[in-house]
Image (cartoon, rainbow, N blue to C red):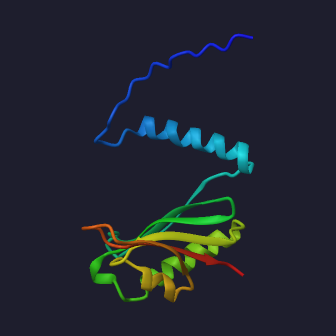
Amino acid sequence: MVDVEQELIVKFEVFSERDEQTLDALISGVRSYNFEKAGPGTSKPLAVICRDECGTLIGGIAGRTIYRQFLIEVLWIEKGSRRTGLGRKLMEMAEIEAKERGCLAAQVDTLSFQGPGFYKKLGFETVGKVSGIPESPERHFLLKRYD
């Protein structure tokens, strides 16, 4: 048997703007690999939003459910509506839907000035933290297991 090494010829590109087609191809590749290793897991978007009486978006939560987990990607409340309970209500509604989809946990990462305290009040626990990076706020990784 002859072992022949072939030189792989590649071209690298650096992007400074979001390229949806490339991003979709990368995500598709990861999903294929995940399917091989963890079995079928359908990623399904989950979002709950709130609008004021004029129809203006004042808050929302968005993420996805996959492998029995609710992965929170963003939670935002407009400045004038913060500390009114709106964030808690959005979280409650999203978690109800996540549980109905069979989720056993929720996870989120947030910066130190954004919301670790908010999530802890809702029953999340810190499972990881990245700190000590100059000119960068701490990043908190939080998890909430559902009973």
Q: Residue 37 in the image: x percent, y percent?
A: 72, 47
Going 70% across and 10% down the picture, which residue do you hit? 2
On-image quarter of the C terminus: bottom right
Going 69% across and 71% down the picture, which residue do you hit? 104
Q: Is residue 93 visible?
A: yes
Going 68% across and 59% down the picture, which residue do you hit? 67
Q: Quadrant of residue 105?
A: bottom right
Q: Is residue 3 left or right of residue 85?
A: right
Q: Residue 18 in the image: x percent, y percent?
A: 35, 43
Residue 21 drawn above or below residue 95: above
Q: Residue 36 in the image: x percent, y percent?
A: 72, 42
Q: Quadrant of residue 71?
A: bottom right
Residue 48 drawn above or below residue 39: below
Going 68% across and 78% down the picture, which residue do you hit? 146
Q: Is residue 67 left or right of residue 77?
A: right
Along the line of sight, which residue is nearer the eye, 144 or 56? 144
On-image quarter of the N terminus: top right
Q: Is residue 49 visible?
A: no
Q: Is residue 14 left or right of residue 126?
A: left
Along the line of sight, which residue is nearer the eye, 72 or 136? 136
Q: Residue furthest left?
A: 135
